Amino acid sequence: MQISKRSVHRLLEKLKDLDAVICFNRKGNTYYYIESFELEVSIKVKAISKNNTVKLYGGTFFDKKHFPASLWQ
């Protein structure tokens, strides 16, 4: 997935802040929910020009104008 361990831990903490009960399975080397957890995800699709995109995480494209200029340097 090309994501750092620290990023995974930050995501897990955010999910826990939303009351998700998450544990780690050492044998399976994976995280799992202890109980049902509902998470609503919203995705916005917008056509943008190739000059205004950057490739992150092996295939996700983001519009440059929504991120600080320091990310592109």
Image: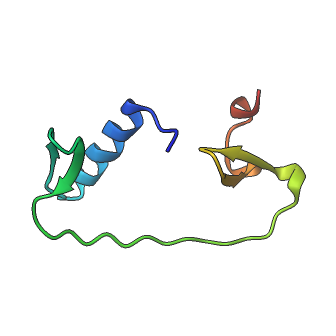
For residue 10, above or below residue 6: below
Color scheme of the displayed model: rainbow
The residue closer to the viewer here, 36 or 16, is 36
Question: Residue 73 is drawn in which quadrant?
Answer: top right
Across and down, in percent, residue 43 comes to 55, 71
Hey, which residue is sitting farthest top in the picture?
Answer: 73
Image position, residue 46 (x, y; %): 73, 71
| Residue in the picture at 36% in, 40% down | 8
Q: Who's the residue at 52% across and 39% down the image? A: 2
Q: Is residue 51 left or right of residue 27?
A: right
Specify the quadrant of the image occupied by residue 39. bottom left
Q: Seen from this angle, which residue lies furthest left?
A: 34
Residue 13 x, y percent position in the rendering = 26, 44
Q: Is residue 6 left or right of residue 60?
A: left
Whether residue 27 sits left or right of residue 6 in the image: it is left
Question: In the image, what residue occupies the spot 15% across and 41% down?
Answer: 27
The answer to whether 71 is drawn above or below residue 49 in the figure is above
Name the one closer to the observer, 37 or 59: 59
Image position, residue 66 (x, y; %): 69, 51
